[in-house]
Image: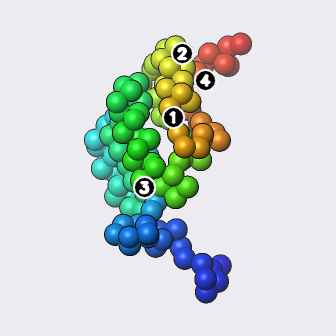
Amino acid sequence: SETKNEVPIDEKKEDDGSSAKVSCVGVDRSIESIDIANERYSKCKFLLVNVLVPEEMDTLRTTCESSLQGEAPSIICVDINGNREIDGVLRCVQMIMNEKWKRQPRMIIVKSRFLYWDLKER
């Protein structure tokens, strides 16, 4: 429940009042997935980004800094498209971890069939 002085996240504005800050940013490599996410979660920002491309990670970081409350994501969720080998999954996570965030994410969640199968076999 909100008190008089609290403003819902989606209504908070930047200092210049021109645009609202968002609480989450999503990324995907599929424009169709981005479109669906934008329809379902209009209070979040979704970007077409490949985390394995340094220039695209730079775009993600700068967009987060300008759009997110707190200027950096607290949690990053990665959905590995298809059946990417473990080395590819680890490269994705490494790219996220090595980015020059103003504040490092506290958690990275990875959805990967190969990672699951590999860990299950150990």
Assess whether mark 1 and mark 3 are in contact (beta carbons under 8 angstroms).
no
Task: Give the side of residue 53 with respect to residue 72, left or right.
Answer: left
**Dot 3: element:** helix
Q: Which of marks 4 and 1 precedes in the sequence?
A: 1
Residue that carries the numbered disc 3 in the rendered image: 67
Assess whether mark 2 and mark 4 are in contact (beta carbons under 8 angstroms).
no
> What is the x, y in percent for residue 35?
30, 50
**Dot 2: element:** helix
Q: Nearer the viewer, mark 4 or mark 2?
A: 2
Q: Which of marks 1 and 3 precedes in the sequence?
A: 3
Judged from this view, the residue extending furthest toward the right is 122
Q: CA distance from mark 3 to mark 4?
A: 33 Å
Q: Nearer the viewer, mark 3 or mark 1?
A: 1
Disc 1 residue type? Lys
Q: CA distance from mark 4 to mark 2?
A: 10 Å
> What is the x, y in percent for residue 4?
61, 86
Disc 4 residue type? Tyr
Q: CA distance from mark 2 to mark 3?
A: 32 Å
Residue that carries the numbered disc 2 in the rendered image: 86
Assess whether mark 4 and mark 1 are in contact (beta carbons under 8 angstroms).
no
Residue at 42% from the left image edge and 30% from the top image edge: 51
